[in-house]
Image (cartoon, coloured by chain):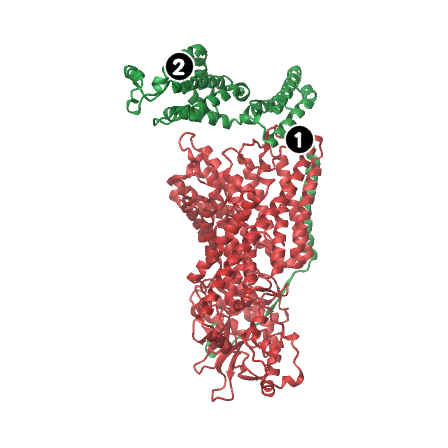
Chain colours: A green, B red
Amino acid sequence: MVLLLKVVACFVVLLHCSRAQASSFEVNLTVLPSFIWDDVANRLNALPSILTVSPSQEPSFHSSSDLLLSSFHGDPEISDYCRELLHIFGQRYVSYVNCLVSSARPVKVCLNCFMLYNRLTDIYSNISQVGLGNESCQVTLLRSDRLMLVYELYDKITDIWKTSHCSNCLSNDSLSSDALHYMAKLNESLRCFESQKSNHSELCKECKASYKVLNDLYGRMEKNKSLCIDIEDAMNMTRILWSKSFNCSFPREETVPVIAVSSFMLFLPIIFYLSSFLHSEQKKRKLIHPKRVKSSNSLMNIQDKHS
Amino acid sequence: MANIAKKVSWSSRGDEPAQGEGTPLLNGTGAARYSRQFSGGKLFHIGRLSTVDLEEEIDEEESVVSRPKEIPHNEKLLSLKYESLDYDNSENQLFLEEERRMSQMGFKCLEMSRWLVCALIGILTGLIACFIDIVVENLAGLKYQVIQQNIERFTETGGLSISLILWVLLNSAFVMVGSVIVAFFEPIAAGSGIPQIKCYLNGVKIPRVVRLKTLVVKVCGVICSVVGGLAVGKEGPMIHSGAVVAAGISQGRSTSLKRDFKIFEYFRRDTEKRDFVSAGAAAGVSAAFGAPVGGVLFSLEEGASFWNQMLTWRIFFASMISTFTLNFFMSIYHNKPGDFSNPGLINFGRFDSDSTEYYLYEIPLFIIMGAFGERESYCGNLSLALLHFNGPVLFLVFSRRAHVSFTPAGGLLGALFNVLNYWLTILRIRYIHRPCLQVMEAVLVAAVTATVSFTMIYFSDDCQPLGEDQLEEYPLQLFCADGEYNSMATAVFNTPERSVRSLFHSPAGSYNPVTLGIFTITYFFLACWTYGLTVSAGVFIPSLLIGAAWGRLFGILLASFTPHNSIQTLADPGKYALIGAAAQLGGIVRMTLSLTVIMVEATGNVTYGLPIMLVLMTAKIVGDYFVEGLYDIHIKLQSVPFLHWDAPATSHSLTAREVMSSPVTCFNLVEKVGTIVDVLSNTSTNHNGFPVVSRLSDGCEPGKICGLILRSQLIVLLKHKVFVERARSRLNQRKLQLKDFRDAYPRFPPIQSIHVSQDERECMMDLTEFMNPTPYTVTQETSLPRVFKLFRALGLRHLIVVDSDNQVVGLVTRKDLARYHLGKHGLEELQLAQT
């Protein structure tokens, strides 16, 4: 049970800390090595009992082990078949999460774990389809209580899968040729970086070709939308190495011609306004005088008084 | 005081020469002067003023006589070329007969066809908006793509100055096309068109403003100027376009294309046309901003002086149809039919996530921004006083945060948009009036805009990574690290609409303060320089962009001066960008109600209604203290006789006697054709309405008022030769009908084109049937505000002044009323000028 908690905790951390704070990751990572596959498999036998706790009995999770035992044998709801499915689901889930966490940084979640994910999807689709005979594990396992734990777990993990765009790098349950090609080019560049590490200016010259190939390939893949998080991350790292660590960006060299051309352009309006001010004749308006009534005597009087 | 005296004597100086010339027709030129003195005598506070005035006048009386009566163009003129619309129906016998013939069913059909016309207006306006949007998007996309590729190539190999030249050339080429068609083919299509439509709805007939040619030039012009990268928007011209569409459709024919569809003939007069034009303007706003209610309120606030509930409902209908049409066709264009997410030309994006909520304590901050927005349109050194004026308490509470962010921005953005633009426009009217000069100026502005943009991008060190969901379509990397992009280019290397959206919605940290500051300043001056060029383009988007930039800057600085954990929501600069945009736009155009609703509708967030309203209120109050709104300034500079809501506040002492023109050229009930032709051909008296008096028969007293006849009616009568003698000789001659008047509308031929033989000059013409027998009249003692109210409320064109015996003594027209305005020194009088 504690183990399950850890799995869930680790997974929650994974969810919430996509921009991971290193510290929390480390904490979890130190826990994870203790997950030994067999160990997990053994202990998972206890899982169904937890999952089948009826809603009314849920609240005291930790303190109700005797209660759990009592309900273990007598629960009519869950069949052996479903329990078996659930068991396998648990195993595959744990192994996938395990893989995800271990390949979190640098990101290799697609390349390393896609097999595990496919297996997880298989078992989930088994659970969610209407089973043999009258048995439907879909109802008992997925929606018989408020928590709907199996569904929720799967849903969250699918979200991660979707956000990482892993399917872009896969074709027919294996890595796509694009992705493999990219990886090859990436390794080429990185090898070149490695060989020229001592002298940065040399590196910029020597590795430019391979880096450019890599960069262009990435640009093409970006347009095709065939990028997954692994490739994006790898490219980001390479670019940071190239531009920031090795400082191989384009320098701002031709400031003088740019300034010259711009100041020429900026100078034109001044000439224009000056010349049109001096040479263009000013537009004059002819005044028109409206017909008005002749002043009356009273008005004249006022005027006389004032003047 | 000396200044005042000079000002007044200036206007009187103009009066002098005419007095010297003393043509009998233009008699009584001194009266204008006397009337002013008269008011001066009555009003205590300008009593002294008029004394000074008189002394100067007497001094100048002799010396000034030889002076030419030409003065440089200024804002204190009224142009003769503008005439009034005949909003008031001429209820002559023909009209009454026709109305009597019409059945109840006929009136119902008319009402139905009004709705039909409104639907058509909406649909066509929406389609035009759609067309503009698609063409601009594609052309601008092409342009930016070419430049982007060029820059990318030359970043690597060197030679970026060539990219600069390419950019300059592309921009200039587009703008040159746009400017040439405006300057040489239809100058009235220049600018946003909102001042012109405002005048039209006010009742001034602006020549050629609602013609098909204007529409075509406007649409092409706006496409060219937006694609040409000027600091302009395509939203303002939509309003003009909508108005032209409305005026065109409602007439059921096109004079330019010489096609008459023989429909909607009933609507061929100013009254109906003007109602439809207000619907068209509303449809235009609605298509531009996706704000149907805002459109209706715009028509209400800016335009329609004459308003009734049914009209409102119809206008709303047109607006709704227009935004729906745009939405529908844009969804098809984007291959997502049925997905209605493009209600307007500009899409502000949705402000509905949690991070963009505002809290009560932020409202004072927003209000300060309102004042700030205005302050940008006025001098910097007044800003501090203004702040304190605006609410010392608020200022104290927020001084710690607000002050810091004010000081730099206030110092940097000192100039004021409206005043700068005012001087610039005067300069343009006076010196840059030839079309080729105007084209050159526009091209230069385009070139400089491109140069400045490029230089800003080139020297910007602000690099930001591009998020997955960011809207940037043409990112420029230049000297940034790979994977990062020049953040100045996000703001500059883009159509203004996209930049606005990016400023509203980019996550915190997408722009650094220096970038925003530089951008605000340069764009402020560029936009100010651009508005008023001979290209068709609007000022909405540039204002929004300037405001959004400094608003975002404000938000960023605010966030950086607050402790990090205390107030989370201050961290989102997007909402400050929105408030800043509202403040800036409000400070420039001074719209209130309609702008609030437009902003609320465009952002799709009602909760922002209150802060936006408060901001616009502050901006208007503070702004009106210094200078008028941009549109009003331009209306004034065009010398349009514009009637505001009310007569000037201190004009109660003036009566109809001083206001009216006198003596009046009148006609007899049965008038000799020769006299009529002579009067109409007289170029010095370009009158449009003639009181008809009875002198001879019927036992009337001489000069007693019988009716009013318009120039246009007389011309139609002369054209059809409706003479008494002819009617006698040919009894079976077709009787003149109202239709004949409608067919000639709205372009009545000039009198010169009508040939009247010597024999015909001796004929007589009976005006009884055609004149309006019930014109509005007032007595000589009616006060100016009362006359003004009549004009404004009834949409009059001529108001006859009669004495106690009902004899015509004078005639009041729009120009007689519009010349009074409240200047800095009390009531001032504008002069009439030939332009």
Q: Chain of mark 2?
A: A
Residue on which disc 1 sits: A252
Question: Whole-percent x and y of residue B440?
Answer: 68, 52
Question: Looking at the image, can residue A290 be seen?
Answer: no
Name the residue: 48% across, 43% down: B578
Q: Chain of mark 1?
A: A
Residue B85 at x, y percent in the picture = 53, 67
Query: Distance between the Cα atoms at labels 2 and 1?
Result: 62 Å
Query: Could you say which is closer to the camera, residue B567 or residue B766?
Result: B766
Q: Residue B251: x, y in percent?
A: 55, 65
From the viewer's side, name the closer residue of B171 and A162.
A162
Mark 2 or mark 1: which comes first in sequence?
Answer: 2
Mark 1 surroundings: few (<14), some (14-19) or many (≥20) residues within 10 A? few
Q: Are marks 2 and 1 in contact (CB under 8 Å)?
A: no
Q: Is residue B722 visible?
A: yes
Tell me where residue B117 appears, x and y as whole percent. 51, 61
Closer to viewer: mark 2 or mark 1: 2
* Image vertical order of residue B770 relative to residue B36, above or below: below
Could you tell me the amino acid type at mark 2? Leu
In the rendered image, the quadrant that contains the C terminus of chain B is bottom right
Residue A278 is left or right of residue A297, and the answer is: right
In the rendered structure, find residue A91 and report the number of the disc placed on it.
none
Q: Is residue A260 above or below residue A290?
A: above
In the rendered view, tell whether residue B686 sits above or below residue A44.
below
Mark 2 residue crowding within 10 angstroms, few (<14) / some (14–19) / many (20+): some
Residue beneath disc 2: A44
Identify which amino acid the numbered label 1 is placed on: Arg
Q: Mark 2 falls on what kind of element?
A: helix
